[in-house]
Image: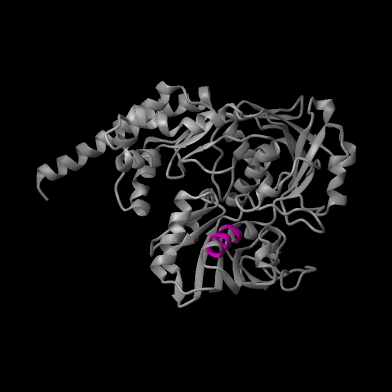
Amino acid sequence: MSQDVREACLNDWKLREETAEAMIPLVGGLYRKNNVVLSVYGRPIINRSVIDIIKAHRFVRQVEKEELSVQDTLPVLKVLVDCGVANCHIDIGKMAIQFREEGQGQSLDDFVKGQLEQVVEQAKSAQDGKDVVLYGFGRIGRLLARIMVEKAGGGQSMRLRAIVVRKGKGNDLMKRASLLRRDSIHGSFKGTIQVDEENTALIVNGTYIQIIYANSPSEIDYTQYGINDALVIDNTGVWRDAEGLGQHAACKGVAKVLLTAPGKGDLKNIVYGVNHGDIEESDNILSAASCTTNAITPVLKALNDEYGIEGGHVETVHSYTNDQNLIDNYHKGDRRGRAAALNMVITETGAAKAVSKALPELEGKLTGNAIRVPTPNVSMAILSLTLNKEVSKDDLNDYLREVSLHSSLQKQIDYVHSPEVVSSDFVGNRCAGIVDGEATIVSGNRVNVYVWYDNEYGYSRQVVRIAQQLCNVYYPTYPWVEK
């Protein structure tokens, strides 16, 4: 390789770094002042480093088969700053590609403003939200706290006001703060955490969070803490029907309750992106279903809409969870008493049947089972389906890739096509499930679709999306996605 080529590569990289550095204050200003959340093909660029921003642009070549540079999106970003857009989510990567393909001689300024007309109009109707309380502070509770604090920087109207836990022995408050600060799977918390011992509270990136010690919901009057008309998100799973969760609804200061586990009885199980339209104003208690149901239902909906599903089986390869034993010991569930980190454990799952609660047209068409495996996070669902018509592997993958990029399910379905990806590559993925196109198998009308999912973080994102709807926090998205 000649010296000129080496110099050209290095100079190109320096230019990309310089351009990304120029983007950071513009991205931050739009977020903090105007509550505009920016991304590049679904990859967020708020509070990200220069390298993170460059990598988000580099990712585009995997899905659009063409390059996208920071030099393409910086001009778009400058127009957004000048036009005063507010209270919305904008994918500047998709906007830059769309301008390249559809600009037709327009100036970038005219194109951007024209594309955002509907988004700006919808943003005017954004409503104030409610106070939010986390009841329980385990794996999902701590991730929900991280996500909600992350969103608070832009003036997000969903306010995390309190966390309810049973008081533990020792220095409970410091231990809670430490568990929020350090996570063996998801890494260190990006920010600062202060402990207010005198008032029993945590101050997380400026968000003041009251810690309430209680052994049951009946002990709590939230209005004593200035909390009113709150949404309580129950992460404990202790109560899973309307009667049990009604204990929260009976508390002073509570308006609605959301369960982060499959609901029982007549409780609505909501998979955001699929049946969130079923939520009515009168619904005071709802379930966010399970992580697996959230991972597979959007993909099943997409396949059923396009090809029709005659029947099939869902096999879940699931990371071990806290309800299994670390070493062999008694457990009320079959096989779950064996050491989780040493064994593959066959167990049951209700996810396949639960799909029909969000997607009634698949009632009775799916069976399911699960295998717990010795990994701490990220799971996989294998959808073995018989479709109503034949399809090729390329056509099936192209369709699912398109759904992941340009449909109302783009926040639920991600798509990857690489022969080298493994489970740890999907830690922290924001989508409910990620289709592995390389692994797809097709034979006529029989298909096997492999769906990865971060059963902790991806699910928590789905919970937050439901919470936003319950709190009347809705920000329109560009490219336009129906509510």
With respect to residue 353, does 288 lie above or below? Answer: above
Q: Position of residue 165 (x, y in %)?
A: 78, 41
Quarter of the image where one finds residue 343: bottom right
Q: Is residue 299 magenta?
A: yes
Q: Position of residue 81 (x, y in %)?
A: 42, 24
Q: Is residue 105 magenta?
A: no
Q: Position of residue 414 (x, y in %)?
A: 49, 54
Quarter of the image where one finds residue 4: top left
With respect to residue 384, does 160 lie above or below? Answer: above
Q: Is residue 255 visible?
A: yes
Q: In the shown orientation, is residue 111 left or right of residue 266?
A: left
With respect to residue 408, does 146 lie above or below? Answer: above
Residue drawn at the location 82% of the way across and 52% of the way down: 239
Q: Is residue 21 visible?
A: no
Magenta stretch, residue numbers: 297-304
Q: Which of the image's four quarters has the C terminus?
A: top right
Q: Position of residue 15 (x, y in %)?
A: 25, 34
With respect to residue 155, does 393 lie above or below? Answer: below
Nearer-the-camera pick, 187 or 112:
112
Nearer-the-camera pick, 419 or 344:
419
Residue drawn at the location 46% of the way across and 44% of the way down: 42
Nearer-the-camera pick, 194 or 384:
384
